[in-house]
Amino acid sequence: MKRSIPKVLLIWLFLTVAFAADSFGQQADSTIYISVDSCPSFRYKNCRVADDCIKQFISEHLVWPDIESDMYVKVLVQVVVEKDGTLSNIRVVRGVEEWFNRKAVEIVQSMPKWTPGKKGNKIVRTQLTFPVVWQ
């Protein structure tokens, strides 16, 4: 009986190390990049330039408050473009009134998938900041 305990202990130790090594090799890279070789891009309808597509999508989805419409409001929104093109970590980095901040986040949350950024030939999570403008 004394010899079986060390064998069981050795088998347990071997399996623990084997599973740990296996899961270590399969961990996903969760790094968020600010500088990439190929920036994320957004396509919408017939637009060809990402900045124009973003502006067109935002302008088509803007909601005006029940106030004077001859004003200029800009809310800076920061997002992370995930590897699958979805947006996460959406937040206002420079806002104005709460109503505009909330609407800016809602518009960005409703955006379809993006083409993710690349570092080398590897698709990576990328942080971007862009304005949502009422004018």
Image (cartoon, rainbow, N blue to C red):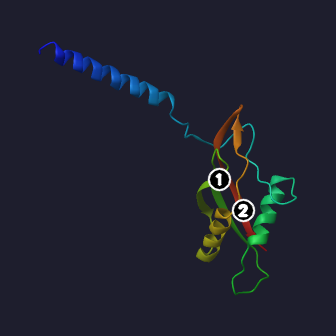
Count numbered badges in the picture. 2
Q: What quarter of the picture does the N terminus occupy?
A: top left
Label 1: which secondary element? loop
* Position in image of residue 73 (x %, y %): 72, 73
Q: Position of residue 27 (x, y in %)?
A: 50, 34
Gap in angstroms between the C-alphas marked 1 and 2: 18 Å
Q: What x and y, as percent, mark residue 64? A: 72, 80
Residue 102 vs residue 21, the one in the foreground: 21
Disc 2, SS = strand
Which residue ends up furthest to the left in the rendered image? Answer: 1
Kindly give the residue lying farthest to the top in the view shown: 3
Q: Residue at x 76, y 53 (%)?
A: 42
Q: Quadrant of residue 75?
A: bottom right
Question: Left or right: where does residue 134 sit relative to residue 5?
Answer: right
Q: Of residues 118 and 19, which is closer to you in this image?
A: 19
Quarter of the picture holding the C terminus: bottom right
In the picture, the disc for residue 67 is none
Across and down, in percent, residue 12 comes to: 28, 23
Amino acid type for the residue under numbered disc 2? Pro
Q: Mark 2: few, some, or many residues within 10 Å (few <14, many ≥20)?
A: some
Residue indicated by mark 2: 131
Residue pictured at 77% horizontal, 60% vertical: 54
In the rendering, which numbered label is found on residue 86? Answer: 1
Image quadrant in which you'd find residue 106:
bottom right
Residue flagged by tag 1: what amino acid is it? Thr
